[in-house]
Every structure is written in C-alpha cells, then in structure tokens.
Image (tube, rainbow, N blue to C red):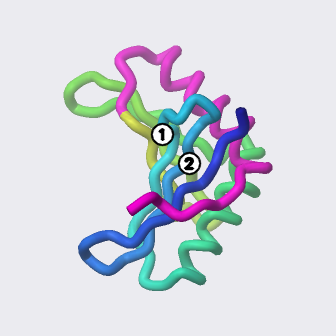
Amino acid sequence: MAGKFVSSVGKDGKHYFVLKAGNGETILQSQGYASEKSRDNGIESVRKNSQEPKRFEKKVAANGRFFFTLNATNGQIIGKSQMYKTESGRNNGIDSVGRNAPDAKVVAAAD
C-alpha cells in the first residue's frame, strides 16, 4: 500500500499536511500554511528534499526521545516527525519518508 499526503485545515484556519506510510502511520507533519497553494508547495518540497539524505536533521528531544526534521535547501523546516523511543526507529522513519513521499497521492482529510 502506497503512502499519501493528507491535507487539512486546522481550527486556526491554516492549511496542513501529514505524510502517512502505507500502513496509515504518520511519518511527517507540516507547519501551518496561510494558503492551499503554500501547502501544496510544501508537499512538493517534501517530495524533492526527501530524496536528499543531507536534508534530514536527526535530533534528540529533552526527554530523550528521537525525532527528525526535513529541511528545505534554505534551511527552513518543511516537516517534523513523530517522537521515537529509539534511534533506529527514527532512522527507519527517515527511510520511510524517502520511500513514500515521491509517489504519494494528496487526499483531503475525512471530516
């Protein structure tokens, strides 16, 4: 089963997306965008930058959990992962973004 980008509008009126793996697990979530066009540009940026390993920044939260961000060429964060218990879990998440993002379809969130 292929991954997908799920788009939505938050209670704050901003446009968001999450990248879900084929099993339905969220592997990357976006910041809020002012418009649909900006959100769609963010999705295209994920597709492009997810194929460049150097665009992923591996991090450790204050509570010791592992996560990553995907950064654009200008250094801006495009998306952030969930928190992982292990470093290997985080690394698997990075691999999953790289596999799922390029061909993921964009769908609207269910109401």
Q: State the image coordinates of residue 100 (x, y, percent, origin top left).
A: 70, 40
Q: Which residue is mark 1?
A: 26
Does the stretch in magenta take in 54? Answer: no
Tell me the SS state at disc 2.
strand
Q: Is residue 95 above or below residue 69?
A: above
Query: In the image, is residue 84 above or below residue 97?
Result: above
Is there CB contact under 8 Å for labels 1 and 2?
yes
Q: Quadrant of the C terminus?
A: bottom left
Q: In the image, what residue occupies the spot 39% across and 24% down?
A: 84
Secondary structure of the residue carrying numbered label 1: strand
Q: Callout 2, which amino acid?
A: Leu
Q: Quadrant of residue 110?
A: bottom left
Q: Which residue is mark 2?
A: 19
Per the model, the C-alpha gap separating discs 1 and 2 is 6 Å
Start and end of the magenta stretch? Answer: 83-111
Q: 10 Å neighbourhood of mark 1: few (<14), some, or many (≥20)?
A: some
- Location of the N terminus by quadrant is top right
Q: Depth check: give the residue in front, 91 or 32.
A: 32
